[in-house]
Image (spheres, rainbow, N blue to C red):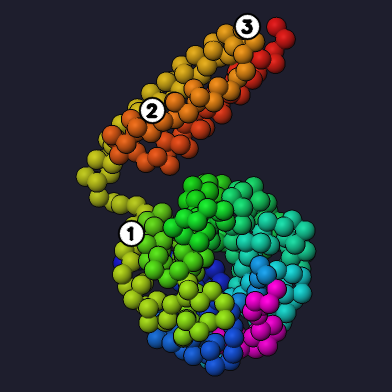
Amino acid sequence: MKNQHTIPITIAGEILDSPLIIAGPCSAESEEQVMTCARELTKSGKVKVYRAGIWKPRTRPGSYEGIGNEGLKWLKQVKQETGLKTATEVATEKHVYEALKYGVDVMWIGARTTGNPFSMHEISEALKGVDVTVLIKNPVNPDVELWYGAYERIHKAGIQHIGLIHRGFTSYEKLRYKNQPLWQLSIEMKRRLPHLPMICDPSHIAGTREYLGEIAQKALDLDYNGLMIEVHPTPDSALSDAKQQITPAQLDQLLSNLIYRNPDSTDVNFMHVLEELRAKVDGFDDSLIELLGQRMAISQEIGKYKKKNNITILQQNRWEEILTLAEQKASKFGLSKEFIDIVFNAIHIESINKQNAIMNNPS
């Protein structure tokens, strides 16, 4: 059963069901590849928007950088033959004009472009007065303000149908996924812009096909409004991002395995139990805030004592001792080291700020 979302996703004048499925190859490589993939994707009826990269921003020169304008003709053919809406990435003013010329329905702004205010200004100027759907990917860096700023520029250009794409954030560490989800940042964007649809791009988060299902399920569990997944007739021979693409048949299986949850319930008993549990959470939150306030008061007393004795604010050995003990105690309650590190680092920074204010107070 599909979610019944209240956030509409409008593309080319049509309100599409949620969760919206956007699928297609990372790059348009040939007319045969584009058309074969599109025809296969129409069989299940689950895919509503066909995506294909026409211009590919590559990290290093020499990689496949896209077929260029020729691929736009193939996207137009896809729409005419299959009825699928079409989507491609735009990174320059010229891209916008060319995509409009060939009737592309959805333009998405890539992670590199989102983080560049100059490029965003150029694209937003090109989009003024245009009736098209624009989806904005999160920037490469974990910066909500850059993401929000990109939205503001597109919104001020007069675009009525805007959505967000969560594709993960770059990390120097070699972790499970190619790009780290940092779900809390997309949740913050949903909080700031609750009227906008949020689409998840599991392909770019995962970087490899084996993790697509678990990421897609997490996105649906967080009430996302759609998925963008890279699909190729023969993924292993793809000219770009081969490891993260799947076949149309594999996509159909992946979507069939997903659990579609409802955002709300009309079950009175369920709501009653939920409200009781939420009341307990609120009580714990109140206690946490009170305890944090008391802890910061002690930190200020420590700051005064350090100032009086001309001692530095940061005591590295003491901080490492606190963190180690916290991690050990937290494990007994099933709390992850990552979670504890985030919480205690935030507490530590606030303590340092309060002690620093005392140190620099002349009175």
Which of labels 3 and 1 is toward the front?
3
Q: Residue at x 74, y 56 (%)?
A: 117
Horizontal and vertical percent for residue 104?
A: 63, 78
Stretch of the chain drawn in magenta: 61-79
Residue annotated with mark 2: 325
Q: Amino acid under label 3?
A: Lys
Rendered view: 267 above or below 132 = above
Q: In this view of the protein, which residue sits in the foreground, 207 or 285? A: 207
Q: Amino acid under label 2?
A: Leu
Q: Secondary structure at mark 2?
A: helix
Crowd class of label 1 (few under 14; some 14 to 19; many from 20; radius 10 Å): some
Crowd class of label 3 (few under 14; some 14 to 19; many from 20; radius 10 Å): few
Residue annotated with mark 3: 308
Q: Residue at x 37, y 78 (%)?
A: 250
Horizontal and vertical percent for residue 207?
A: 49, 66
Q: Which image quarter: residue 29?
A: bottom right
Residue annotated with mark 1: 261
Q: Secondary structure at mark 3?
A: helix
Q: From where the camera sits, is residue 71 visible?
A: yes
Instruction: Tell whether position 71 is magenta.
Output: yes
Q: Residue at x 30, y 52 (%)?
A: 265
Q: CA distance from mark 3 to mark 1?
A: 58 Å
Q: Residue at x 46, y 60 (%)?
A: 177
